Amino acid sequence: MTTLTAEPAHTTSAAAVQVQPVTQARVLSSEWIKMRSLRSTGLTLLAGLVAMVAVGWLVGWATNAHWSRMGPDERLRFNPIDSSLTGYHLAQLAVGVLGVLLISGEYATGMIRATFAAVPHRLPVLWAKAALYAVVTFVLMLIAGFAAFLGGQQFLSSHGTTLSATHALRDVIGVAGYLTLIGVLAVALGFIIRSTAGGIATLFGLLLVLPGIGQVLPTSWQLHTLPYLPSNAGASMFTESTDPGSLSASGGLFVLCLWVVAGLIGAAVLVKRRDA
Amino acid sequence: MIEARGLTKKYGEKTAVDDLTFTVQPGIVTGFLGPNGAGKSTTMRLILGLDSPTSGSVTVGGKPYAQHAKPLQTVGALLEARAVHTSRSAYNHLRALAATHGIAKSRVDEVIDMVGLQDVARKRAGGFSLGMGQRLGIASALLADPETLILDEPVNGLDPEGIRWIRDLLKSLAAEGHTVFVSSHLMSEMALTAEHVIVVGRGRLMADMPMAQLIAQASANVVVVRSPQATALGKALAGPDVVVSSTEKDLLEVTGLSAAQIGDQARDLGISLHELAPKQASLEEAFMEMTRDEVEYHAATPANLNGSARSAA
């Protein structure tokens, strides 16, 4: 394996190596190569996609099969759109874990030093990773959302609805948007926390644990806190919530965007200031 | 050309790099020598802007590293800890780095061939041996044909053939006018490669001089003398600036006198000499001598005879 070239003299080769200045576009293409060349990227995103679709279909099938045994309250609460998009709970795990891992993996292996040596301004790396992951997640989760919705309605049969129903299209796009924003938040947390375990724990603490803790607050406090948590604000983007004080779809989008922007600003400040 | 001015880095209370001022010139291989923990790797990270200095500054080619539009063409670096994602193949690792500077794929293949990794380039870098990892690091460093090369312990984990390859590579790069800055804790390796040497101990600059001068200085005219009347000769040679020590019967090590002076004195006394040899200190010894006070823990050395001769029992 280790046959060495006999003459080290031609290391700098006859023809000069063509080298271009570092630009945001070149950093994007570099990050695109990095993202595609890790097997975990494809596997995790596939898991998220399958979870989104399979859960939507399964819930549709189960609801249809048990319709006759459902009580009147249950039937009243039933929403065919929400039911087919239930898989987002699982999909957000995949999207969140991968978002953290794309960054923490570089810190854990030492790759980040090679990355920052090539791009010493550092911030182009943060923007490239966040933007690429956002695009990839949005496209895949939009496909997953449509598949979950359309298939789910088929399984719901006569209890189902169509894309032309009120809010149906908005919710399908909304769920993809939510998962995308969670993915970007995960990327920001990856840069802030730098360790895989810490990043994942922080993300899901924020998404899953905080709302539970919020439940024990006095009701008057809950009204002013719970709707603004990233999970609840995000859910407002694509569910027909009847919870008191819950935000409108656009309000939820705005609040979740604020979380993501805050995360990215925090990440940018730390990435620029900390030793790599 | 690398220029450090008052470069200082503190991690909390610990000072890793302490007011380093030095210049690394192009056209020669400059060794960066020091015991483990002396601040060599930190200094190299400071040069690359990976860590920011507590005070002082360092420039490459007249500018801080980060201000270069094509940083990889300015400095190619091999850092001590492997800076490679373990799940990615060597080829894709290099392709991703190349993409930041718009470097063609053909150059990636070229550096892979150059370091002899063509057979394993498509395999996960995580499965690489230490030596293969070093080769991949060297391939990344050479990718953009940089003006300056910074290599942190490049021979670590390489087989003798690989070590010789590195040695020749560094020399030929320097001969082409590149600035080559190589750290090592292996003094013997540096003696064969570096023309100039910068020695650090506990973050402080200990020496910055041509390799030949370092060795000459450290040799400190030690002369090995073998004589059947070593005890008598030792007594006769002893003086205020002369140190005579003995590690075995019939053998003296004399510091402070030249071989000629010792030989003449022996003739005057009628003492026969069986051996009279000026001892060239190895770089190892020069280095030990220099950093002795800078190493936190060191083994006790055999007591020297100070100014007066001791009977060689």
Image (cartoon, rainbow, N blue to C red):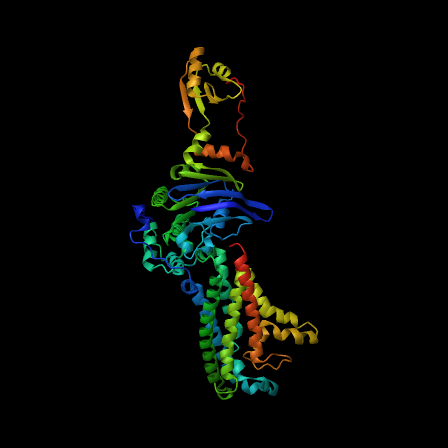
Q: Does A17 appear above or below A39?
A: above
Q: Where, by quadrant of the figure, is residue A251 drawn?
A: bottom right
**Residue A160 place in picture, x, y as percent:** 50, 86
Q: Residue at x 49, y 48 (%)?
A: B58
Q: Where, by quadrant of the figure, is residue B265 drawn?
A: top left
Q: Residue at x 59, y 66 (%)?
A: A205
Q: Nearer the viewer, residue B39 or A163?
A: B39
**Residue B82 place in picture, x, y as percent:** 45, 51
- Number of numbered labels in the structure image: 0
Can you see residue A58? no
**Residue A45 place in picture, x, y as percent:** 46, 69
Q: Residue furthest front?
A: B62
Q: Does B304 appear above or below A249?
A: above
Q: Does B301 appear above or below B249?
A: below
Is B254 left or right of B165, judged from the image as shown? Answer: right
**Residue A141 place in picture, x, y as percent:** 47, 74
Q: Does B17 appear above or below A196?
A: above
Can you see residue B261? yes
Q: Nearer the viewer, residue A44 or B103?
A: B103
